[in-house]
Image (cartoon, rainbow, N blue to C red):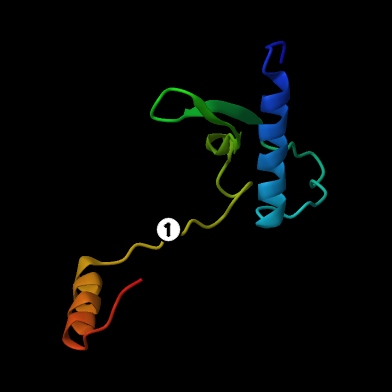
């Protein structure tokens, strides 16, 4: 954080933390005995306009989830995936009933 644009990066980090709080991304709680919190790192990126000028500074807080251990840090995984047959059925009903998908 010794760059000349240090203040912009600090502002981007603050915006990221505020966004995580507003969206209730986590619940603050005490760690169980003999446990450590998962490590994290900051990812920084400069978003640019088509002309090359700086649009904004973007900071993202990322937890190193690959360090989790099944049965200790988590016990279930769930990833909702729609079957193609379900998507086709939904589109078919919408087309027949002249409905709009948003």
68 is higher (above) or lower (below) than 5: below
Query: Which residue is found at the position 55% from the left and 46% from the top?
Result: 70
The quarter of the picture where the N terminus appears is top right
Name the foreground residue: 44 vs 48: 48
Task: State which quadrant residue 7 falls in.
Answer: top right
Q: Is residue 8 left or right of residue 70?
A: right
Q: How many labels does the image show?
A: 1
Q: Find residue 85 and report its image quarter.
A: bottom left
Q: Nearer the viewer, residue 98 or 81?
A: 98
Quadrant where the image shows the C terminus: bottom left
Q: Residues within 10 Å of mark 1 (few under 14, many from 20)?
A: few
Q: Residue at x 59, y 50 (%)?
A: 71
Q: In this rendering, would 69 be left or right of 18?
A: left
Q: Is residue 50 above or below residue 69?
A: above
Q: Which residue is drawn at 16% across and 86% down?
A: 96
What residue sits right under mark 1 in the picture?
79
Q: Where is residue 65 in the image (x, y as percent from the top left)?
A: 56, 39
The location of residue 81, given as percent across then percent down, is 34, 62
Is label 1 in a helix, a strand or a loop?
A: loop
Residue occupying the point 65% across, 53% down:
25
Residue 79 in which image quadrant: bottom left
89 left or right, relative to 7: left
């Amino acid at each position: 954080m010794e760059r000349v644009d240090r203040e912009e990066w600090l502002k981007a980090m603050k915006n990221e933390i505020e966004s995580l709080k507003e969206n209730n991304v986590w619940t603050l709680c005490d760690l169980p005995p003999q446990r450590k919190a998962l490590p994290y790192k900051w990812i920084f990126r400069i978003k640019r306009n088509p002309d090359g000028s700086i649009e904004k500074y973007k900071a993202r807080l990322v937890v190193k989830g690959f360090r989790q251990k099944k049965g200790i840090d988590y016990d279930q995984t769930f990833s909702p995936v729609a079957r193609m047959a379900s998507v086709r059925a939904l589109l078919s009903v919408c087309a027949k009933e002249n409905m709009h998908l948003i």
